[in-house]
Image: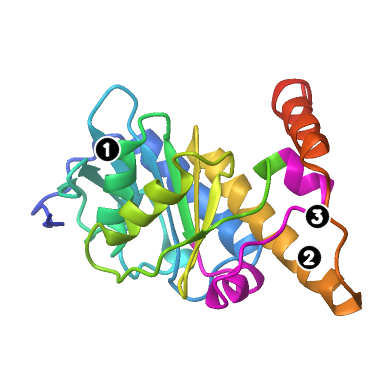
C-alpha cells in the first residue's frame, strides 16, 4: 500500500475535514497527545474514502488543510499534506470493519503504560462496563509503516464489545460509529486506565460480576442519554 501525495489541493470534503480538524482539540484538551503524535480519522459517507490528520502537523496549526483525503487503500487523493504514518492501519480497519466510521490513535500516558506491560485494563468500574462492556484488551506488537497495526486492531476488536485496544508497546487505538464517538472512547480509555492504576496502588481492585457487566453495558448502550 502507498500513501502518495497529490500535487494540488482541490478542497474536496472541506466541511468534514474542518470537523475532524476541530476534533483534534479534544485530544490536546484531555492531554491524550504530545507534540504532533496521535490522529483522528473519519470515513466519508457513501464513498470509499476517509479523512485523516497530516503527518507531523502541529495541533496549534491544524486547519482543514492539515487533513488529507485518502482512499481505502491508504492512497492520498486530495490535500497538500502527506497523511499520517498510521494511514495504512486506519485504511485496513475501514476495509474490514464496515461498521466503523471513525478512529483515533493516542499515546495517552496511563493507557500506554498498560500497553507497555501488555496488560489489559480489567473491568473493575461501572464506567468501564458502560463504555467498554468488559476489559480493555491488548493487541499484538506491530511495527508502524504498513497495515500490521490495522490487522492487530481488527483481530482484537472483531469479537469484542470494547471500542478500544491497547496495542502492545505502542498505545491506544479506538473505533466508533463516528470520529466523535472514537474520540470519546479515547478520552474514556485514559480516564479508566488512570483510575484503575490508582486503585491498584491501594490494593487489588474488586472485580464486577459478568452478569452485572452485561446489565450495565446494555443499559448504557440502549437506555442512557436523550
57 relative position to 110: left or right: left
* Labels 3 and 2: the sequence-earlier one: 3
Mark 1 → mark 2, Cα distance in angstroms: 34 Å
Location of mark 2 (residue): 196
Mark 3 → mark 2, Cα distance in angstroms: 8 Å
Residue 135: percent from the left, percent from the top?
Answer: 66, 52
- Magenta segment boundaries in residue numbering: 106-130
Q: Quadrant of the N terminus?
A: bottom left
124 relative position to 182: left or right: right
**Location of residue 109 (image quadrant):** bottom right
Location of mark 3 (residue): 124
| Residue with the most extreme left position | 7
Location of mark 1 (residue): 95
Residue drawn at (27%, 37%) of the image: 95
* Labels 1 and 2: the sequence-earlier one: 1
Residue drawn at (45%, 72%) of the image: 170
Between 184 and 23, the residue placed more toward the observer is 184
Amino acid at each position: 500500500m502507498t500513501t502518495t501525495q497529490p500535487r494540488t489541493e482541490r478542497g474536496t470534503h472541506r466541511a468534514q475535514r474542518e470537523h475532524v480538524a476541530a476534533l483534534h482539540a479534544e485530544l490536546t484538551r484531555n492531554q491524550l497527545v504530545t507534540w504532533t503524535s496521535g490522529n483522528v480519522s473519519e470515513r466519508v459517507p457513501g464513498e470509499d474514502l476517509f479523512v485523516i490528520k497530516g503527518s507531523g502537523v502541529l495541533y496549534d496549526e491544524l486547519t482543514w488543510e492539515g487533513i488529507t483525503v485518502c482512499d481505502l487503500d491508504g492512497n492520498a487523493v486530495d490535500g497538500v499534506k502527506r497523511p499520517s504514518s498510521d494511514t495504512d492501519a486506519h485504511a485496513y480497519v475501514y476495509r474490514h470493519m464496515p461498521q466503523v466510521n471513525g478512529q483515533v490513535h493516542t499515546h495517552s500516558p496511563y493507557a500506554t503504560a498498560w500497553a507497555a506491560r501488555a496488560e489489559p485494563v480489567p473491568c473493575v468500574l461501572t464506567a468501564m462496563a458502560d463504555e467498554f462492556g468488559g476489559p480493555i484488551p491488548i493487541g499484538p506488537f506491530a511495527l508502524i509503516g504498513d497495515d500490521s497495526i490495522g490487522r492487530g486492531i481488527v483481530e482484537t476488536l472483531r469479537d469484542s464489545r470494547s471500542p478500544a485496544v491497547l496495542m502492545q508497546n505502542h498505545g491506544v487505538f479506538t473505533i466508533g460509529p463516528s470520529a466523535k464517538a472514537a474520540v470519546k472512547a479515547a478520552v474514556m480509555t485514559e480516564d479508566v486506565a488512570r483510575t484503575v492504576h490508582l486503585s491498584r496502588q491501594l490494593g487489588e481492585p474488586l472485580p464486577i460480576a459478568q452478569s452485572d457487566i452485561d446489565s450495565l453495558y446494555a443499559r448504557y448502550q440502549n437506555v442512557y442519554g436523550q
